[in-house]
Amino acid sequence: MTSEGLRVRRVGFRLGTDKELADMHLVESEIDTERWPGRVPQPLEKYMAFARSLPAQFDDHTWLAETEAGAIVGCSACWSDAAGDPTVMECYVYVRPTERRQGAGWQLARAVINEARSEGRSRLVWTTYDSAPAGEELARRLGGRIARVNRNSELRINQIDWQMVGSWIHDGPGRAPGYSLEFWEGPFPPDRLEDAARFHHIMNTAPRDELEVGDTVLAPEQVADIDRHLVEAGRQRWTCFVRNPAGSCVGGTEMTFESWEPTVGFQQNTAIDPDHRGHGLAKWAKAAMLARIRSERPDVGLIRTGNAYSNEPMLAINTALGFQIVEVRTEWQGDVGSLQRQLP
């Protein structure tokens, strides 16, 4: 595909060559630097390990935009999830800051939209960031609709009110008699795969606002494949399951850690089954996780997380802990046919 000296060509991600992955890493690293000046960038070898170990449930498609001389301008990708909504594809379009407003974004978007249409997907979903406003501009010009607005936040360990955290841990068993917490580090053993799948199913109860996507329902074997990816990508994970008096998993919380950024923890999913809310279980689990990090990973000084603005119960917990907003993340969606009609 050629347009005014620009070529967009399909490349591999899971099956990408070293050169293709290095070129995509170049683009994505510049976007990350634009969003978070001064943060530690993901090393190329970790990016490659992530790409090549991608779980089988994801069907990925990627493109690079380059000049006739071979200079890299941008990249785009889209992917479907066999455990998720079959009508939906997620995607992104990234153009290097110095190469914008020359048509590359449109050409990269065209590749994504055409792929979605050829597969019979009816909706595309993507994300923009207030710290990189060019993404929102393209989203609006494509006719995308805002579906959910989220905040990315940070918490400094040395600013936590540990007396409050201790009270949440102390009060947990009293507020929820018979409930318990169970910690796992790393991949789950076979007898915990059902619990992990159940925990992720509970995440479907999180607010979606206007986001028109169906549930993601993981099978135990898909959890095992995600764990394989976790190990091969070099990522560490701590999970805390919340169990009811009968011993069943009714929620939990999880943290991940990246080897290249050892002073940072990433707060991932936290969810409690609606039938078991109102007992302070999320507070108890999150407090216990923070206390464990403080005790066993003293090198971690910062926690990062993201939440929908509509998720008031979780935001109340995070606000009490002291999380500060550092970025606004907006999820967009568009009907494939409408998006295609907006292309020049």
Image (spheres, grey):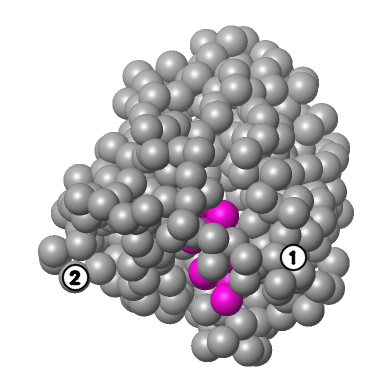
Secondary element at tag 2? loop
Question: Which badge, 1 or 2, is on the more N-terminal residue?
Answer: 1
Nearer to us in this view, 298 or 24: 298
Nearer to us in this view, 263 or 38: 263
Which residue in the structure is indicated by mark 1? 155
The residue shown at (74%, 65%) is 155
Q: Position of residue 222 (x, y in %)?
A: 23, 52
Q: Is residue 248 magenta?
A: no
Secondary element at tag 1? strand
Which residue in the structure is indicated by mark 2? 189
Q: Position of residue 271 (x, y in %)?
A: 46, 46
Q: Position of residue 236 (x, y in %)?
A: 44, 76
Q: Main secondary structure of the magenta part?
A: helix
Q: Spot the residue most to the left.
A: 191
Q: Is residue 71 left or right of residue 272?
A: right
Q: Position of residue 40 (x, y in %)?
A: 72, 77
Q: Quadrant of the N terminus?
A: top right
Q: Amino acid at mark 1?
A: Leu
Q: Quadrant of the C terminus?
A: top right
Give the magenta range. Answer: 282-291
Q: Is residue 235 left or right of residue 344?
A: left
- Please tell me whether residue 181 is drawn above or below residue 294 in the rendered image: above
Q: Which mark is residue 60?
A: none
- Please tell me whether residue 141 is drawn above or below residue 219 in the rendered image: above
- Please tell me whether residue 176 is drawn above or below residue 166 in the rendered image: above
Residue 78, visible in the rendered structure: no
